[in-house]
Image: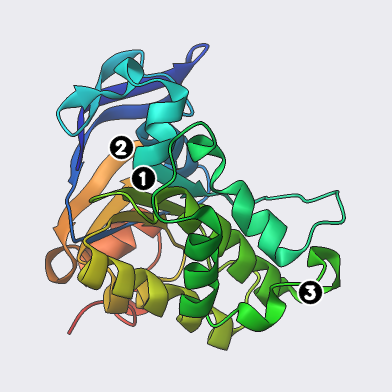
Amino acid sequence: MIQVNNVFYEIGEKKILSDISLSMEQGQMLAILGANGAGKSTLLKLMTGSLAVKCGSILLNDKPLGDYSIRELSKKRAVLSQVNPISFPFTAFEIVMLGRSPYLLDKQGQSDHQIVDEILTTLDAQHLKDRLFSTMSGGEQQRIHFARVLAQIWDQENPCLFLDEPTSALDLKQQLRILELAKKLVQERGYSLCMILHDLNMARHYADRVLLLKDGNISAYGEVKDVLVTQKIAHTFDITFEYADKYACR
C-alpha cells in the first residue's frame, strides 16, 4: 500500500499541493478528480516516485519511496501515463515485452513470453500480437499500452497500478473495457489502484474511494457515497448545486 503524509509541493513560489494525506489500500481503487490545474498529475507523479517529495513523506509498504532503487520501484508499481509516444516500428508483442525490462537480469521462472501472452489474452488482444503499433486504432493502442504496464507488475505480489486519465480520447466501449479490467485486477489480483479521472459517473461506478482536489488542497476524501455528494461536487468544480446534483450519489 501507499501512504501519503502531509505532502506539500511548490514550484518556485507557486504552491501546487498543500498538506495532502491519503492512503492507497490493497484491493481498492482510488479515483482522483478535480478541475484542470488542481494538482492531480503532480500528486500522481509524487506518489509514483517520478517527482521527489520535498516536504512530507510518501511510503510504499512502510518504506519511503526515495529509499527504493529505480529497478526495485519498477517492480512494485507501474504507471500508465497520458502520453506514450512510440516512434519505432514495433509490433504489439514487442511493446508489451518492454514492460518486462526490469526483470532482464533476473533468473526467469515463468518466462517473459508466457506472461506477455497471458496478458494479451486477458485483454482480449491476442489478435493484435503481430500487428504494427502504428496501424492500430486509438483504442487498440491504449489496450497495448495497458498491457505493457501490466507486464511490469504481473507476477508481483500486491503491486500498485497508477492510471493517468486512462479513458481520455476513447469511445464509450473502450472506456468501459479499460475500467472493467482495472476493477477486475483490483478484485481478483489484489492490486492497489489509483487513477485520475474527469468523469464523475465513472468514478461513482468503479472507485472504492475518491479524492477531490481543488487548487492543490483536498476538497473531500473518503468513500464514494460520502464524497460524491452535491455540495462537495459543487464546491470542487465551481458549479451550481443544480448541475452538481446530476452527478451526486443517490
SS at mark 2 in the image = strand
Note whether 244 is above or below 60 in the view shown.
below
Amino acid of disc 2: Asn
Q: Place residue 229 in its image quadrant.
A: bottom left
Disc marking residue 217? 2
Amino acid of disc 1: Lys
The residue that appears at 79% across and 65% down in the rendered structure is 133
Where is residue 106? Give x, y as percent: 45, 35
Q: Place residue 190 in its image quadrant.
A: bottom left
Q: Badge 2: how crowded within 10 Å, few (<14), some, or many (20+)? A: some
Where is residue 230? Give x, y as percent: 23, 71
Q: Badge 3: how crowded within 10 Å, few (<14), some, or many (20+)? A: some
For discs 1 and 3, the disc positioned in front in the rendered view: 3
Check if mark 1's residue and mark 2's residue have beta carbons within 8 Å: yes
C-alpha distance separating marks 3 and 2: 39 Å
Disc marking residue 136? 3
Q: Place residue 124 in its image quadrant.
A: bottom right
For discs 3 and 2, the disc positioned in front in the rendered view: 3
SS at mark 3 in the image = loop
Check if mark 1's residue and mark 3's residue have beta carbons within 8 Å: no
Residue 13 as seen in the image, left or right of residue 153? right
Disc marking residue 214? 1
Reading the chain from its start, which is encountered first: label 1 or label 3? 3
Where is residue 91? Give x, y as percent: 77, 63
Check if mark 3's residue and mark 2's residue have beta carbons within 8 Å: no
Q: Which of 199 and 191 is in front in this view?
A: 191
Q: Badge 1: how crowded within 10 Å, few (<14), some, or many (20+)? A: many
C-alpha distance separating marks 1 and 2: 5 Å
Note whether 161 is above or below 3 in the view shown.
below
The residue that appears at 14% across and 28% down in the rendered structure is 62
